[in-house]
Image: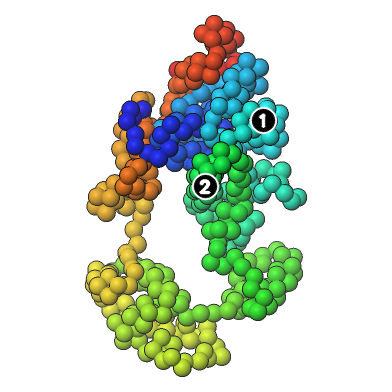
Amino acid sequence: MVNEHNGAFVGLKVIELGRFIAAPYCAQLLADSGADVIKIEPLEGDQTRRNGTIIPGEGIQYLNKNRGKRSVAVNLTNTEVNSAVRALCEKADVIIANFRPGVAETLGLDYATLKKQNTRLIYAENTGYGLEGPLAGNPAMDAAIQAFSGLAHLGPEGPSLRPDPIIDYMAAMLLSWGIASALYHREKTDIGQRIDVALLQAALVLQNNNAHHIDVIADWRKEYVSFLAEAYKDSDPWSGMIERRTELLPHVVTGAYYGFLRTSNGVIVISAAVDSLQRKIATLLDIDDPRVTDPKWAPPDDIKAYQTDIRDQVQSVLLTNTTEHWLKIFNEAGVPCQRYQTLEELIDTTQVKENEFMIRLEHELLGGMDVVAPPVKFSETPLAAQGPSPVLGKHTEEVLLEAGMTHELFQKLVDSGDALSFS
């Protein structure tokens, strides 16, 4: 562990009863800010220790969400262990949990039970579908919520999952913001509270640009939903669903200046979502587009055809020169654009290195590794990784003794073989 840390959460005691992504990544953010995060794992460890296994007990998906924590590996159904963990939780500032529905109550680790001993406790919970409604108790993961929320990509061959679990990470960010807000409230009132972030709500946040129902322009959505009720009866409805949505969705010409376009030697992306930027592109490329130059312009009846024509003109001009040429032209004009590159290329770029967006850690079993750095820059309370992810059970003994367990009881539990694990 790093001995000195100037983060805003130095002195904060956090107990993580989390698994998978959202809760562990949220806890990692707090650890980067100096909090003492104790991760309570089952004897076999968080399931992600076996996702992308490098060596037994050390998987890629564990390494990137659990740095800077202390690992306690225990059987929470053991009476003595449960008593010690409850003692830890009753003295904690923050608990981050994502138990399966009903498990926390069975173990006596739910908010209603713990707040009786600690009214200042902030209990941050990550659920799938929220606390109410017919799906409240259902198990959920990113993929299930992608499907249910419409965030999964719909192509001509059917829906497909987005490659990264972005819902989980958005939920982690919302959860960490919620904890920070609750801590600020506690400073003023000395009262804790429960926080819930549902994966389904996180999926809606990610779709905030389009997740709305505005009465005066909502007729198309109602018509489309009615269409879908019949379309799903077809054994292969996907292309029809896409076509119908395209027909009904109100069109804007933004798409003519937005997205991936080919150059003579590659692909660039242009991100011009406002009139001022679109006007710059039209001028630079000598495109006749009265929509961005004529204040009195009125949309034609076939706005889709108009947009397609403008985009075709933009594409034709871009094909006349190289990626490097257009990047220089657009960047000098203040138009957001960039070449396409893979994540594997990005990690080695000067931009990432000079901003320290990746950091180097030394793992006691795996050696050196470059990982994503703490994601926010603070001038006075800088974030810093407190160390790599812990080996399973590395801190079981020290934490349980801190909780008040005697050496004799600890040894008795070690000898039992099914109560705890330590290294």
Residue 46 as seen in the image, left or right of residue 102: left
Identify the secondary structure beneath mark 2.
Answer: helix
The 10 Å Cα crowd at callout 1, few under 14, some 14 to 19, many 20 or more, is few
Quadrant, the N terminus: top left
Residue at image location 55% in from the left, 62% down from the top: 207
- Residue 405 lies, in percent from the top left, at 55, 13
Quadrant in the picture for residue 365: top left
Residue at image location 54% in from the left, 15% down from the top: 404
Quadrant in the picture for residue 261: bottom left
Residue 241 as seen in the image, left or right of residue 72: right
- Residue 70 lies, in percent from the top left, at 45, 27
Q: Which residue is label 2 attached to? A: 181
Relative to residue 246, is residue 10 depicted above or below?
Answer: above
Identify the secondary structure beneath mark 1.
Answer: loop
Residue at image location 46% in from the left, 77% down from the top: 254
**Picture disc at residue 116:** 1
The 10 Å Cα crowd at callout 2, few under 14, some 14 to 19, many 20 or more, is few
Which of disc 2 and disc 1 is earlier in sequence?
1
Residue 266 as seen in the image, left or right of residue 294: left
Relative to residue 421, is residue 17 depicted above or below?
Answer: below
Spatial separation of the CA atoms under disc 1 and disc 2 = 22 Å
Disc 2 residue type? Ser
Disc 1 residue type? Lys
Relative to residue 118, is residue 87 depicted above or below?
Answer: above
- Residue 54 lies, in percent from the top left, at 42, 32
